[in-house]
Amino acid sequence: MTDDSAPSMAELALEYGLKADEYDLIVKRLNREPNALELGVFSVMWSEHCSYKSSRKHLAKFPTKGPRVIQGPGENAGVVDIGDGQACVFKMESHNHPSFIEPYQGAATGVGGIMRDVFTMGARPIALLNALRFGDPSHPKTKRLVAGVVAGIGGYGNCVGVPTVAGETNFHSGYDGNILVNAMCVGLADADKIFYSAAPSAGLSVVYFGSKTGRDGIHGATMASAAFDDDSDEKRPTVQVGDPFAEKLLIEATLELMASGAVAAIQDMGAAGLTSSSVEMAGKGAVGVELDLDAVPQREEGMTAYEMMLSESQERMLAVLKPGREADGQRIFEKWGLDAAVIGQTTDTGRIVLRHKGQIVCDLPLAPLTEDAPLYERPWTQPPVAPKLTPAEVPPPADYGQAVLRLMSCPDMASKRWLWEQYDRHVMADTLAESGTASDAGIVRVHGSKKALALTSDCTPRYVQADPYEGGKQAVAEAWRNLTAVGADPIAITDNLNFGNPERPEIMGQIVRAIDGMAEACRALDFPVVGGNVSLYNETNGAGIPPTPAVGGVGLIPDYARRASFKGLKAGDALVLIGETHGEMGSSLYLREILGREEGAPPPVDLVLERRAGDFVRGLIRAGEATVVHDLSDGGLVAAAAEMALAADVGVVLNATSHEHAHFYLFGEDQGRYLIATTEPEALIARAHAAGVHASVAGQAGGDALASAQGLFSLPLPALREAHEGWMPAYMA
Amino acid sequence: MKAAVIVFPGSNCDRDCKTAIERTTGAEVSMVWHGDTSLPDGLDLIVLPGGFSYGDYLRCGAMAAQSPVMRAIKAEAGRGTGVLGVCNGFQILCEAGLLPGALLRNAGLKYVCTAVALDVVNSQTRFTAAYRDRRDVSMTVGNGEGNYFADETTLDRLEGEGQVVFRYRDNPNGSARDIAGIVNDRGNVLGMMPHPDRAFEEELGSSDGALLFQSVLASA
């Protein structure tokens, strides 16, 4: 190759995903042209994935403080106080782009990556959740993607030995070209033994340990910050390959190293690998770092400095050790059979200097890579808001029985047993509730105590699509409600903001308004954001995904003897409906699945009523006065009643209402509502009214069918169960 | 009662087994690293826990069966000490030749995590005496390779000699003759796919596994 045909640095910058003006900014900041390696370092550090350059200004709107918050956003994961000197460490992160290209490895490494974020902070991972969105079931790629993603999640989490206890799965044509795989990990640590990434001083050893560095995943962070086109499959080489056995060893070795007292600072190598981990540690510590790349454990021969710095090989950690503690590290790494090497030192220069084969191959100031990275106030337009539907626009179903069956068997409502039976939900022997136990949230015990953590993941993308602000509110409120419905005090959330291309003003408008709505709900419910992840550019050939700000919520149950599930309904119980019902049908499942229409304003969330109803319900559970509780969400009253009936194998007869309003009553998706089973409905209703909460009897348990008192439908439970359980196995067969 | 739980790299139910034994029997439980060549003295029970020893990248349990500690375990088993292998532990016992047969890929070709109803076929063993005439118990399984296989002669012998200890009432993985757990001919080595270490308290959905550990305690 002659010099003439070599691309200029400016051209290379475009190839690496930087914009022309960003390249000019680099030259200005450096006062010179970067070399190709330096350009690579800039391109990943300035990628959306690492820099949050489009979203950071808006993320600042989230409330991030609270009495239980130990660490808010900005670290590997959020940390909250759960009493008794213990802390819960958690985070949710996307692995959308890689999972679409290579579903098994994409999903598996997503699980691995989020676990590393949690144990990097000193916490043992104790639970996993996932939020999955796939394309329309009829799309030719969907089935293969579902099978691959589910096998990947299970293959990784099961092997490492962390239970997967909850999740959500949606199907919609809006995800045909961009599926979403969001994984959440929750860990447990001592509150006074949280580890951070900031290197405390100069002159300390930087130790690399874990798997060797290979050529996989180079430029993964850049790919994750780009839109897809028809050639996306060609990006497969940028997807990393996971080794859960290595991860298991890495967890044990990391926690042992931390317990030995040798660790001064630590950071996993996630997106942008060695580049972002070393830059973060030195940048956050306001020191500098010098690395000798020849010392990096390498899987392949002849790796260039560029390949080593940009590799996203999995299961690797970088630690800064306290002075003279290298031998402790060596002993532990040998015990666990991990590769390890001192690859450099912290310095006081404020620069990252890389040596390779005796040459300085990179010498950059840290500031432009981190705090001085570009920050965009992207132009945005107010997103269109779907108008409220009038009752006349929503006709009743031709056949109520058929409508209920169709609702309960539609892809979003149907049982996901096929999927969660592939996840180990019981390892660690502290799981009290999981996807298979009829619970609104997963529940795991805090080992050796009476306490338990309630965990949930929520978002209703069709609401966010119809009205980003209300939909954003609803995602937070539903997480809060699900935690409340099992008897937990909601503590905090991690968010996972999945959107299309932020350079399109209408998409940026969705992001801005969804964040506004989420922040409003977080404030009203005292439910701060302690961590999060942004996944933008989820678009293919110009079409963005439905806006999907997933919310991962954590709550605390002080005594797990006092908790609720939606199993346990007994014949003779009354079902008391808590909360107000107006019959909100806009953007409902009824509208989409029965009438075939996707339109209308989503149900508004009245945050004052939400909180009042939730506090009342939680109080009942805590007092031991309610043990069978279910929140109302997709599909409204009839769906919640159906799920309770199926869980207990006891029929339910729903009360009569005026004929023209029956479908609004049964299928409306009004927010802030719960069903509680009780033998003393009058007393419960009186107490609710005294607390300023709306309550009424909605039905009675008994018989062997889900039925309406006014004879609109009567579905024998076996038929209902077959419809609900049958869809997914039949689809995947 | 004294028990030891073996920790292989990739074991992930080692702590669960320790907790289950401690809470159900009050026994002292030591954790033994796979690289050790000796076991503590005076053990009543050695547990090979579930997990993915060595990643199970070869046949499940095949690498662990060659671990240094296995020599000591074989010697103890030969002396009549109780040995329990759960899930991956069962696979290791088969690979090590301490139990007959092998665990194959599940019939459905997928990992299966589900509650299983079990029939206690033989309550005359040191592991099951506390079940007495209780035959119907519940535990969970979680495995990709839990499909028990042995040749017909071996299966006939296992059944004839009362070595089939647990049977599935609704076979989740295609196991031959619905076998969920077997003992060796001497009755001191039990391998089973269901997890008693995940079913030792009502909060976990079942406490039926507690009886297994308590049986060992009573025989100690």
Image: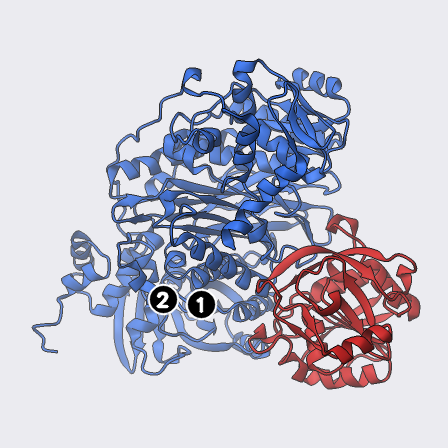
Chain colours: A blue, B red
Check the image and report above or below for A279 versus B102.
above
Q: Position of residue A378 (x, y in %)?
A: 25, 40
Q: Residue shown at 75%/29% (left/top)?
A: A625
Disc 1/disc 2 C-alpha distance (Å):
9 Å
Q: Amino acid at mark 1?
A: Gln
Quick check: A107 left or right of A638? left
Q: Chain of mark 2?
A: A
**Counting residues from the N terminus, which is met first, the one under dot 1 or under dot 2?**
2
When asked about the image quadrant of residue A122, the answer is: bottom right
The residue that mark 1 highlights is A314
Q: Residue shown at 64%/47% (left/top)?
A: A436
Q: Position of residue B53 (x, y in %)?
A: 62, 74
Q: Amino acid at mark 2?
A: Gly
Q: Position of residue A260 (x, y in %)?
A: 60, 69
Check the image and report above or below for B194 versus B38.
above
Q: Chain of mark 1?
A: A
Q: Is residue B26 visible?
A: no
